[in-house]
Image (cartoon, rainbow, N blue to C red):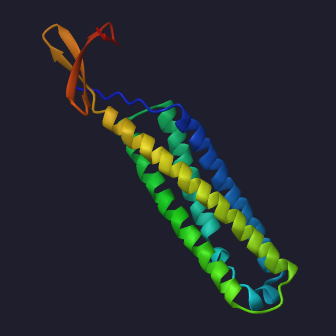
C-alpha cells in the first residue's frame, strides 16, 4: 500500500506563527476601532465613514488568518496529505480575504478624500487604524501566498510512493524529466 511522505519547509512554521500574530493584531485593531467608533460616533460619521469597521473585516479576517496560521504550523509539525490540502485551501481563502480587505481600505480612503471638510483628530486616528490594517493585510497576503507556494511544491513532491518489487523497495518521485525510482534500504533512500 503506498504511503505519502510530505516534506514541507521548516520556515512554514514561522510563517504560520506570523499569520497567527497578524490575526491577533487585526482583532486588536478592530477592538480599538470599535472603542473609537462608540465613543465618537456622531462627529466621526459626519466626515469619515469607517467602511472597514462597518463590514466587520478586522474580525472575520482575523479568524481566517489565525486558522490558516495554525494549520500551517500543524502541517509542518505533523505532515499529512489532508492537512496539507486544508492548509493550502485556508491560505488561498486568506489571500482572498486580505485582497477584499485592501479593497475596503482603499474605498474608505477614497471616500474620505472626496469629502471636503475639517479634519479632526479622530478622523486622523481612524485613518491611522485603517493604514495599520492595510499594512498587516498586505503582510498577510504575502505570507499566505508564500505558504500556498510551498504547500503546492510539497504536494507535488509528496506524490512519492514506496513501490515494492519483489524483495526490493523503491522510492518513486516525479521530476520535470519523469519519474525517478530510488532504492530504499532500512527505511532510508539509497542515492547510489
The answer to which image quadrant residue 122 occupies is: bottom right
> Horizontal and vertical percent for residue 66?
59, 51
Please report the residue visible at 58 percent of the width from the left and 42 percent of the height from the top.
Answer: 15
Q: Residue at x 25, y 34 (%)?
A: 176
Q: Which quadrant is home to the C terminus?
A: top left
Determine the residue positioned at 64% across, 74% down. Answer: 52
In the image, 105 versus 20, the foreground residue is 105
Side of 80 relative to 11 (left or right): left
Could you say where residue 165 lies in the image, as x and y percent from the top left? 14, 14
Residue 87 appearing in the image:
no
**Is residue 192 among what the camera can see?**
yes
The residue sitting at the left extreme is 166
Which residue is pictured at 12% across the width and 10% down the height? 166
Q: Position of residue 59 (x, y in %)?
A: 63, 65
Residue 112 falls left or right of residue 64: right
Which quadrant is the N terminus positioned in? top left
Report the residue that reaches farthest toward the front: 177
Instruction: From the viewer's perspective, tell me whether residue 164 is left or right of residue 146.
Output: left
Q: Observer-nearest residue: 153 or 92? A: 153
Above/below status of 114 relative to 64: below
Above or below 44: residue 86: above
Q: Is residue 176 above or below residue 168?
A: below
How many numbered discs?
Answer: 0
* Quarter occupied by residue 82: top left
Q: Is residue 189 above or below residue 85?
A: above
Using residue 168 as the reference point, say whether residue 134 is left or right of it: right
Q: Residue 131 is drawn in which quadrant?
A: bottom right
Amino acid at each position: 500500500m503506498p504511503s505519502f511522505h510530505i516534506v514541507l519547509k521548516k520556515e512554514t512554521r514561522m510563517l504560520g506563527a506570523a499569520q497567527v500574530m497578524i490575526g491577533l493584531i487585526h482583532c486588536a485593531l478592530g477592538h480599538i476601532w470599535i472603542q473609537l467608533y462608540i465613543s465618537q460616533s456622531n462627529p466621526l460619521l459626519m466626515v469619515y465613514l469607517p467602511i472597514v469597521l462597518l463590514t466587520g473585516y478586522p474580525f472575520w479576517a482575523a479568524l481566517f488568518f489565525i486558522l490558516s496560521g495554525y494549520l500551517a504550523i500543524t502541517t509542518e509539525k505533523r505532515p499529512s496529505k489532508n492537512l496539507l490540502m486544508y492548509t493550502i485551501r485556508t491560505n488561498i481563502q486568506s489571500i482572498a480575504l486580505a485582497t477584499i480587505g485592501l479593497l475596503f481600505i482603499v474605498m474608505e480612503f477614497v471616500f474620505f478624500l472626496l469629502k471636503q471638510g475639517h479634519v479632526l483628530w479622530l478622523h486622523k486616528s481612524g485613518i491611522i487604524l485603517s493604514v495599520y490594517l492595510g499594512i498587516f493585510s498586505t503582510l498577510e497576503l504575502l505570507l499566505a501566498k508564500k505558504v500556498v507556494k510551498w504547500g503546492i511544491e510539497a504536494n507535488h513532491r509528496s506524490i512519492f510512493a514506496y513501490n515494492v518489487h519483489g524483495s526490493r523497495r523503491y522510492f518513486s518521485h516525479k521530476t520535470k524529466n519523469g519519474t525517478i525510482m530510488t532504492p530504499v534500504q532500512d527505511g532510508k533512500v539509497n542515492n547510489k
